[in-house]
Image (tube, rainbow, N blue to C red):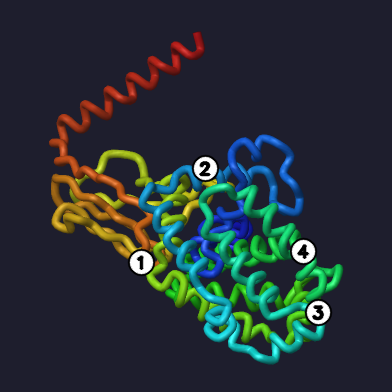
Amino acid sequence: MKKERKFTRKLLLPVLAASVALPSVAAFAPQVSYAKEKADDFVMGMKADYIEEFIQVLKGLTPEGKAQLRQVRDSIQEKSLIWWRDTVIQNPQFIEAAKQKGVTVEEATFLLRDFTLLFYTPDNLQENLLSFKQKHSATLQKLFGNEFGIKDLLDFVKDISKQIIADLMMDHMVDTNKPLDDIVDDAVKRTLEHGKYKKFANKLAELTLSIDEVIQMRKRLAAEIDPNNVARNAFLQAFIRKNVTLSIQPGRLVPGKTKQLTVNVSFPRKISIRSGVTWESSNPEVATVNRKGELTAHKPGTTTITAKLKSIDVGKLDVTVEPKKDKDKEEKDKNKEEKDKKNNDKKDRN
């Protein structure tokens, strides 16, 4: 299990899918032409393999998915400064503390708004990131000093994302069925409580923002800007189409036989998930699947197996159950296979 956790810590993208106010780290992906150059450290703070992966997933968004993303983005842009202050922030002490550091309520509010917009922008990502840096570097410097800048902010989101996907996969393995929103909040909390981000948490505390308050702000924002998770699900489905497949243990499947089903994730390393998955058979008279992913054939026919993680479809697999062969024919086939194998071995030696 520890080995699985090590691998899953690097599965960054679905996180994006996992969180709403952190809907997708894919938003940090630049355009394809930009990815072929050396990535600016402040923009990415990530390895090149992540950059290329995000680009490919963005390209995999359906037209409907891109439209949903833009719809959420437009909704964010329409929100007034008063809405951000009273609905999301809800902390007059923070506004006052920011003023003491030379940051106006407008600057603090637009910093939060523009950072949120980065996650819902499928087009012109490089341009938007550069614009964000130009507009808000001075504000971040006033709020947090030289210890936490733009690159640190992006690294913070990346590390939260890693923690979310690691926890998400571990939750599947131990099958606790923990709500997705709780996984996101726990990841935010642990990231702020440990490592280099403890200093960031201390700076937030100086601004009267406790870790719990940050989590509540995330919840309020998520509930308002994407209540039905349309943007999150669009990214998730794009990731799934590219990186997740189902497989079944090889060999003929006949009535009475049982074979193992597996969910395979290909990025960034190949891992297999069996426990914590919900399996469904479209034709249980032909074959059924238990909670361990063991498929048992009952009678000849076909069925479609669906795998779900956190109630989200991650793949389908068509399975055919063949009729049993009579013993005489089965024995002949077995002898023929052995004879063919010997002949092939002999050819290889020659």
For this rendering, which residue is in front, 304 or 340? 304
Residue assigned mark 4: 137
Dot placed on the residue nearer the N-terminal end, 3 or 4:
3
| Quadrant of res 32 | top right
Would you call the spot at circle 1 few (<14 residues within 10 Å), some (14-19), or many (20 or more)?
Answer: few
- Residue 80 seen in the figure: yes
Would you call the spot at circle 3 few (<14 residues within 10 Å), some (14-19), or many (20 or more)?
Answer: few
Dot placed on the residue nearer the N-terminal end, 4 or 1:
4
User: Are the residues tagged 1 and 2 within 8 Å (C-beta)?
Assistant: no
Dot placed on the residue nearer the N-terminal end, 1 or 2:
2
- Residue flagged by tag 4: what amino acid is it? Ser
**Cα–Cα gap, marks 4 and 2:** 29 Å
Q: Dot 3 lies on which element?
A: loop
Residue 246 location (% of width, % of height): 38, 48
Residue assigned mark 2: 56
Q: Which of pointers 1 and 2 indicates the residue nearer the eye? A: 2
- Residue flagged by tag 1: what amino acid is it? Ser
Residue assigned mark 1: 311
User: Are the residues tagged 3 and 4 within 8 Å (C-beta)?
Assistant: no
Looking at the image, residue 324 sits to the left or right of residue 109; the answer is left
Above or below, 173 relative to 253: below
**Cα–Cα gap, marks 3 and 2:** 41 Å
Dot placed on the residue nearer the N-terminal end, 3 or 2:
2
Residue 112 location (% of width, % of height): 63, 71
Q: Dot 2 lies on which element?
A: helix
Looking at the image, residue 157 sits to the left or right of residue 196; the answer is left
- Residue flagged by tag 2: what amino acid is it? Gln
Dot placed on the residue nearer the N-terminal end, 1 or 3:
3
What residue appears at the point 51 percent right and 51 percent down from the top-left corner? 122
Q: Which of pointers 3 and 2 indicates the residue nearer the eye? A: 3
Q: Which mark is residue 102?
A: 3
Above or below, 333 relative to 55: above
